[in-house]
């Protein structure tokens, strides 16, 4: 994946839009979900949908930080596209009878904490922090989870929806890696050190404290679905492979941080990492939901309905 | 000699031409009023447009003792922008005591910021007060304006091939006079009703209707609060939020009107106060200064006070320096967006479909009517009709890389032609009419020179114009308009052919002097 021309990419994004109404959500095939699959899939889809939504919010923050108008527009589109993915995944859940009326599924507690962090601090983060974390999240959680889903679910409508979602995601990743390389281009030691300064920012430390358990939690969910966790790790290694492909990419210190973090995550024998992080997952599971503030209003924008008549 | 007298006595040469015409053509010519088909002895001044600019020009010419002029108006009524923009809530965003001519004060403005109907009433009042109706030729849509070097005459040809001639010509067609639906994919597929803010459909009943409003600029934020009062549901599609300042709008008390009537100096004093208050705004709006931060803070406080939800506030917070785009003023826009029957949508529009607006989050927002508050077709690089100068040169061609003029009013190679709101004359902080007055008086000086010295050509020197523009562009580079946002002030390439980089007082000083040495005279 070579660096891409962002102007051409923006034109392509604008010309390849799709809507929920392009898919026939009542087409046959919903019954291909087995009774055994159904409860696990319900939980998995709810998490996946929320990850898309979290990604959407991160792109909204990136749009605010974009260095030029083209990238700002691209991120604005990606924000909306991630929301579209969440909406489409909700539409699948509706199709499979996993929604309780018009109810939006509850996010798991780790996601809930990440949502809270994004809402409060994401807009304050520099481009290079979110610009590196987001591709990792996309590759590990979004991209990988989508692939796993297609391996296990036979419903053709699900395949139809994810074909479109994956097309979008490949563009998101293409832009993500290009921006990472842009950020690393010509960086001197001092420049790179400056990029690391936010590590001392307590807001970012809080962010790390919510990001790390989220990855471990998702690993647990993948295993619960009966999927090999190696597939998740393989996807995460893709981040290291593509992001480190060029010298510019490797010179981006945030790429290095996320890369090493990825190595910790994928190496179960790293007890120094996994024991405390798994502990955090357990700890966060004990946080009573009512202790959290009300969900921000952007969360309420989700809908499974292809048309809004009011 | 007035133009109407001239028409009754066609030139002998043209009469001979007519004799040579075919019988059919003769019959056709007879059916039309004589003045529509025959060339005329040029009047002193030909004015294109009967809006604020054209009528103001006419008044100043009259006051200078020049009565021999004709105004060509494409519509059947005067008023220009204010005739066309009669959408609900339409109003000026500069106080009326400043958004009016100082040479025609109106003591009876009903509000501090008057609505479009009242402004149009003021324009009609100008026509009656200064007896301008007899000069106006309605439904004359100029399609070509050409200069003849030999005779030193401008000829305007309408779309119906009528011709009008003048020794000097004023292009007062207005920068905001043309509009069209935006080029959004699928716009023609929409089966519901479409309305453009500048061509309002007063017969459409909004009661109970689901309405989409596209655009949240100066027109949009005035229309939305009114629509929310009547429509069933209003969805507002926003691309870029603008900075919104509070609007100190109030009804004028009766005693105030009485005072202005009895003591005109008090109204002039009020105008001066408003003028200087707005002048000080230049420091915040035109250049990036500590006052810019204060203005942004005021706008943020206004938003915070009116919008409690953090995400909605974020959606409504601009990410460009205040002044880079037009500053908006409203007290009721933010509250309107939060009504139960209103919703702000910031997802990009993917396309318009048969039933509504599809946004990138994948949802089709179905509506009965789409209101396009998408502004005007502002030309930075062309002219509304072909303008041909010396040696057949075409102004639109010369302006392809961005419009340029001398002091915004004359263009080298186009003698005896004056423009109102020409290149680099736009204000960002003060009343457009203040700038207009400077332009009108400058044009009067030029026209007086042409008539007094019986000149065929008064043509600004090319080098003078070039130096002027170099200085203007240098100054513009330091302004907020050129600070990186996209706006209608700039061409696609980021060239600013619209705004004047300075105080209104500076602009007035620039226009106060008519330097004969800057012009070539023949």
Image (cartoon, coloured by chain):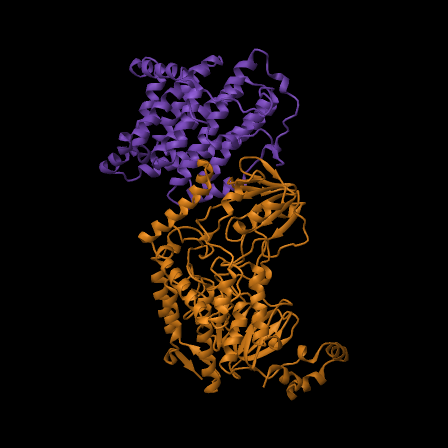
Q: Chain B's shade in the image?
A: orange
Pinpoint residue B505: horizontal percent, then vertical percent.
37, 67
Front residue (pair B344, B472): B344
Where B245 falls versus A148 (above or below)? below
Q: Quadrant of the N terminus of chain A?
A: top left
The residue positioned farthest toward the left in the image shown: A190
The residue positioned farthest toward the front in the image shown: B255
Pinpoint residue A84: horizontal percent, then vertical percent.
53, 32
Pinpoint residue B183: horizontal percent, then vertical percent.
57, 50
Q: What chain is colored purple?
A: A
Pinpoint residue A222: horizontal percent, then vertical percent.
46, 16
Front residue (pair A307, B116): B116
Kindly indicate the quadrant of the structure image that contains residue B286: bottom left
**Residue depicted at x 46% and y 28%:** A295
Front residue (pair A47, B73): B73
Can residue B185 be seen? no
**Residue depicted at x 50% and y 71%:** B104
**Residue depicted at x 56% and y 71%:** B126
Where A139 falls versus B227 (above or below)? above
């Amino acid at each position: 994946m070579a660096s891409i021309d962002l102007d051409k990419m923006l034109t392509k994004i604008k010309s390849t839009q799709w809507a929920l109404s392009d898919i026939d959500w009542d087409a046959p095939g919903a019954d291909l979900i087995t009774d055994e699959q159904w409860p696990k899939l319900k939980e998995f889809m709810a998490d996946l949908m929320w990850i898309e939504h979290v990604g959407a919010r991160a792109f909204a923050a990136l749009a605010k930080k974009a260095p030029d108008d083209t990238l700002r527009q691209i991120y604005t589109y990606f924000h909306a596209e991630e929301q579209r993915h969440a909406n489409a995944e909700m539409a699948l859940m509706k199709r499979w009878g996993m929604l309780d009326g018009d109810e939006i599924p509850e996010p798991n507690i780790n996601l809930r904490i990440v949502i809270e962090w994004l809402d409060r601090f994401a807009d304050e983060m520099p481009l290079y922090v979110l610009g590196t974390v987001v591709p990792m999240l996309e590759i590990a959680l979004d991209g990988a989870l989508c692939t796993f889903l297609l391996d296990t679910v036979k419903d053709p409508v699900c395949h139809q929806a994810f074909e479109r979602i994956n097309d979008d995601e490949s563009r998101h990743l293409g832009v993500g890696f290009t921006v990472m390389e842009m950020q690393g281009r010509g960086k001197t030691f001092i420049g790179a050190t400056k990029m690391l300064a936010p590590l001392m920012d307590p807001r970012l430390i809080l962010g790390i404290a919510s990001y790390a358990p989220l990855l471990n939690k998702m690993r647990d969910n993948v295993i619960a679905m009966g999927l090999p966790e190696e597939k998740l790790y393989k996807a995460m290694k893709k981040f290291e492979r593509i992001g480190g492909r060029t010298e510019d990419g490797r010179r981006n210190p945030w790429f290095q941080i996320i890369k090493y973090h990825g190595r910790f995550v994928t190496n179960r024998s790293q007890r120094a990492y996994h024991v405390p992080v798994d502990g955090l997952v357990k700890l966060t599971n004990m946080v009573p939901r009512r202790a959290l503030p009300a969900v921000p209003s952007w969360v309420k924008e989700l809908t499974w309905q292809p048309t809004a008549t009011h | 000699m007035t133009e109407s007298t001239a028409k009754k006595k066609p030139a002998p040469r043209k009469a001979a031409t007519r004799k040579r015409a075919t019988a059919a053509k003769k019959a056709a010519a007879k059916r039309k009023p004589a003045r529509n088909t025959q060339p005329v002895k040029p009047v002193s001044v030909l004015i294109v447009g009967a809006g604020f600019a054209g009528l103001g020009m006419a008044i100043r010419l009259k006051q200078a003792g020049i009565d021999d002029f004709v105004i060509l108006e494409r519509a059947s009524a005067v008023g220009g922008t204010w005739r066309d923009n009669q959408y609900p809530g339409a109003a000026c965003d500069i106080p009326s005591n400043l958004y009016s001519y100082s040479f025609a004060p109106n003591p009876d403005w009903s509000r501090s910021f008057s609505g479009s109907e009242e402004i149009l009433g003021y324009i009609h009042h100008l026509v009656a007060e200064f007896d301008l109706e007899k000069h106006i030729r309605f439904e004359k849509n100029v399609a070509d304006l050409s200069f003849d070097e030999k005779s030193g005459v401008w000829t305007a040809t309408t779309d119906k091939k009528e011709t009008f001639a003048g020794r000097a010509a004023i292009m007062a067609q207005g920068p905001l006079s043309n509009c069209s639906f935006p080029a959004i994919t699928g716009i023609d597929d929409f089966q519901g009703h479409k309305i453009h803010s500048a061509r309002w459909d007063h017969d459409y009943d909004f009661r109970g209707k689901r309405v989409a409003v596209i655009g949240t600029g100066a027109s949009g934020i005035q229309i939305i609060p009114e629509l929310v009062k009547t429509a069933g549901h209003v969805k507002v599609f926003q691309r870029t939020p603008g900075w919104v300042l509070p609007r100190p709008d109030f009804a004028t008390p009766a005693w105030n009107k009485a005072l202005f009537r009895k003591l005109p100096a008090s109204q002039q004093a009020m105008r001066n106060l408003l003028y200087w208050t707005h002048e000080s705004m230049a420091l915040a709006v035109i250049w990036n200064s500590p006052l810019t931060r204060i203005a942004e803070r005021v706008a943020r406080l206004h938003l915070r006070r009116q919008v409690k939800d953090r995400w909605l506030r974020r959606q409504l917070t601009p990410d460009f320096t205040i002044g880079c785009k037009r500053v908006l003023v409203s007290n009721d826009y933010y509250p309107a967006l939060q009504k139960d029957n209103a919703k702000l949508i910031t997802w990009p529009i993917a396309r318009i479909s048969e039933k509504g607006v599809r946004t990138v989050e994948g949802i089709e927002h179905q509506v009965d009517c789409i209101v396009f508050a998408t502004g005007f077709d502002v030309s930075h690089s062309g002219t509304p009709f072909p303008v041909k100068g010396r040696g057949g040169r075409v102004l639109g061609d010369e302006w392809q890389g961005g419009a340029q003029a001398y002091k915004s009013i004359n263009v080298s190679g186009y003698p005896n032609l004056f423009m109102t709101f020409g290149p680099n004359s736009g204000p960002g902080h003060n009343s457009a009419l203040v700038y207009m007055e400077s332009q009108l008086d400058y044009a009067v000086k030029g026209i007086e020179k042409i008539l007094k010295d019986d000149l065929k050509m008064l043509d600004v020197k090319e080098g003078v114009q070039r130096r002027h523009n170099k200085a203007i562009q240098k100054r513009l580079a330091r302004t907020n308009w050129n600070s990186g946002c996209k706006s209608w002030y700039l061409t696609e390439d980021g060239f600013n052919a619209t705004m004047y980089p300075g105080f209104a007082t500076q602009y007035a000083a620039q226009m106060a002097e008519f330097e004969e040495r800057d012009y070539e005279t023949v």
